[in-house]
Image (cartoon, rainbow, N blue to C red):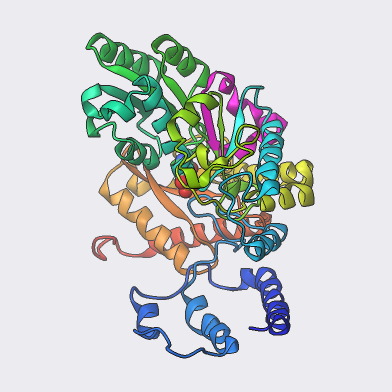
Amino acid sequence: MTPEQFRSHGHQLVDWMADYLRDVGHRRVVPETTPGAVTRALPERPPEQAEPFEQVVADFERLILPGMTHWNHPGWFAYFAANNSPPSILAEMLTATLGAQCMSWQTSPAATELEQVTMRWLARMLELPAGFTGVIQDTASTATLVALLSARERASGFAGERLGVGPEQGLRVYASAEAHSSIAKGVKLAGYGAEALRSIPVDERYALQPDALGEAMARDAAAGLVPACVVATVGSTSSTAIDPLPAVAELCRRHGAWLHVDAAWAGSAAVVPELRWILDGVEHADSLVFNPHKWLLVNFDLSAYFVRDVDTLLRTFTITPEFLRTAHDPDVVNFRDWGIQLGRRFRALKLWFVIRSYGVEGLRSMVRRHVALAREFAGWVEADSEFELLAPAALGLVCFRYRPAAMATDGPGLDGLNRKLLARVNASGRVFLTHTALRGRYAIRLAVGQRCTEREHVEEAWRLVRAAAHDLARQPPSDGPAR
Ligand SMILES: *Cc1c(COP(=O)(O)O)cnc(C)c1O
């Protein structure tokens, strides 16, 4: 591709992108495709000869796009949104154009320094106390693994290199029964051993019970085991439960355990002053992760990891082969030593573009809008005698179910009915919601957090939910088990 061809294809693609973002709401959120359909449409072998770019783009529209789920759709209420925004997309184009590999200061000085500056901006936006230093990781899963590895090194007196730390060390990790699956994965990957994770019961709001945590830690300590790390969740994935950080922090202090806070989704809400309380107690944490790629308009991926004890982080991750040494090493930060990967993308650029393009106030007003819409939806659920909330709707997430008078008791019947209801709602293609289990009960989740979601879209979701309930109520109950 010549520079002039690149220019002209680039202009065409940007036109395509602008149309897509403008019109995505007219598409089905979830595609009508079946497993294997895309594969069958693609050739087994790569082309030996160059193909015209126009052909590649045409096949993208013809073969790939119809098989895509549209996360930018305003009817997106599934999981948690993975947001995007025009400034972020344009910054990604620049990042790809520069193609820099930002493993150390020398390999891209401005990328390193912009990462430091934007992480300090984020720390201010979240009103994090002094003492936290930020670094961008790819995902919250990676950031939590980094925290677990750091905690393991600290708890084992940095003996890892000499001894090979494993389950025989008796290190223990604690998290609530509602903690994200990335915690269990991290414990496994960090080599604590499958036995090491203690699942702590939750209260009626699905938040970790500090008394139960205290008992578990004391019991382990008395048995000669080492409470190495507690992962507290601020905004659980199932229901946005918020663990009591001050009480958890006090237990961590008593046992010398590392406190990692997983605020992957909810952390962004702390940019809003009246929601900052969700991070009360974070001043006692050793580390915190939250995902601007979920709720702060930065496209996937960009996870912000803040850590207090940078020395421990560096002792855990630094290995410097001769070929990576530079003359600047004593004076600069080399982010390759702050995590697992060596090569690093220039992620800070899109964060900088987004914060400047929206201003902190613009981001705040979006979060406020989402939270208000979720509360409004929760109000509609509460006001309808055939529906009920299954968890407090504190932030942008509503967990609810259909419970007609004829089906008052918990059980497979009610779960199956709600499973069917959700399938019907999603089959409309207008919205996409997902589910979870809360105390064994099937719960439908409506997570408001997509940049373009307005009141009309939340209203449409409620209309579709009620219409599906109406249809199901008119069906004889004997139409077989729900799928
Ligand atoms: C989304 C989420 C994660 C995982 O985030 P990734 O960045 O995809 O790894 C972890 N914890 C919580 C609470 C989440 O909501």
**Is 275 inside the magenta-drawn segment?**
yes
- Judge by depth and name the residue closer to the eye, 45 or 451: 45
Q: Residue at x 56, y 86 (%)?
A: 58
Q: Is residue 371 visible?
A: yes
Q: Which quadrant is home to the N terminus?
A: bottom right
In the rendered image of this protein, does residue 348 appear above or below residue 40?
A: above
What type of secondary structure mainly makes up the magenta span?
helix
435 left or right, relative to 172: right
Image quarter of residue 19: bottom right
Q: Which quadrant is home to the C terminus?
A: bottom left
In the rendered image of this protein, does residue 473 appear above or below residue 401?
A: below
Residue 73 image position (x, y, % from top left): 59, 63
**Is 242 inside the magenta-drawn segment?**
no
In the rendered image of this protein, does residue 457 appear above or below residue 182?
A: below
- Judge by depth and name the residue closer to the eye, 291 or 244: 291
82 left or right, relative to 121: left
Residue 456 image position (x, y, % from top left): 66, 59
Count of numbered marks: 0
Q: Is residue 204 visible?
A: no
Residue 49 image position (x, y, % from top left): 47, 91
- Judge by depth and name the residue closer to the eye, 483 or 168: 168
Q: Residue at x 39, y 63 (%)?
A: 474
In the rendered image of this protein, does residue 153 appear above or below residue 378?
A: above
Residue 84 image position (x, y, % from top left): 63, 57
Image quarter of residue 461: bottom right
Q: Residue at x 78, y 48 (%)?
A: 356
Q: Which residues are magenta?
A: 266-289
